[in-house]
Image: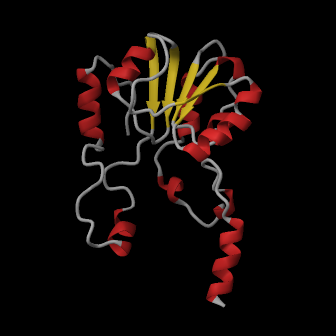
Amino acid sequence: ALYKAWKEEEAKAQIKGWDFSHIEDRYEEEQELPWDFRQVIKNYLRDEMKLLDMETGGGEFLLSLGHLYSMTTAIEAYPPNVELCQHVLTPLGIDFHAADGGEPLPFPDESFDIITNRHGDYDFSEIYRTLKPAGFFITQQVGAENDRDLVNLLQPELTELPFPEQYLSIQEKTFRKQGFKILESA
């Protein structure tokens, strides 16, 4: 019975991009957050702003923002998601580039009014370089100890944190050193 249930779940769980709708109402991680990332973005985003969404997955979250496609750019590096973006985002008129957020970005200086990065990699200097003066970088990172209980349960031998610098206090300090002004953090 367990094997049959597993095979049924496996057949349903064909993940494309960051669409996890097959586990909707069965997983509540983001219900615990003290903010709504989409709403935070919408508080700053205006129609006339040029938007870059970094590490967009398949563009699901990006599309949920409802921003003008002609003012929207996205990057993604994971090959299956790159292919998905090319089939979904590009035909809509969204400027899509296969690129990794932690590497040099394929854009001129001061290209964007707002850059979003839900929880992907980024390079401080590249964010600073590609943002227009008075632009906004909005990110929601998972943190150094993300899912530690699950990791400890499944792989107790993994004692080192994979991203030891991913603490808000460390990231804020680095952003300030790069010349950013922090408007909100939680």
Point out the image quarter for the C terminus: top left
Who is closer to the viewer here, 99 or 156?
99
Decide: is 173 above or below 30. above
Point out the image quarter for the N terminus: bottom right
Who is closer to the viewer here, 41 or 52?
52
Decide: is 29 above or below 98. below
Relative placement, left or right, of 152 versus 90 is left
Decide: is 29 above or below 107. below
Q: Position of residue 82 (x, y in %)?
A: 60, 39
Relative placement, left or right, of 44 versus 135 is right
Who is closer to the viewer here, 69 or 75?
75
Q: Position of residue 171 (x, y in %)?
A: 29, 35
Relative placement, left or right, of 183 versus 83 is left
Q: Which corner quadrant of the image does residue 69 belong to?
A: top right
Residue beneath the point at 61% across and 67% down? 26
Numbered-mark total: 0
Residue 68 visible here? no
Residue beneath the point at 27% across and 20% down? 178
Q: Report the residue that reaches farthest toward the bottom.
A: 1
Residue 104 visible here? yes
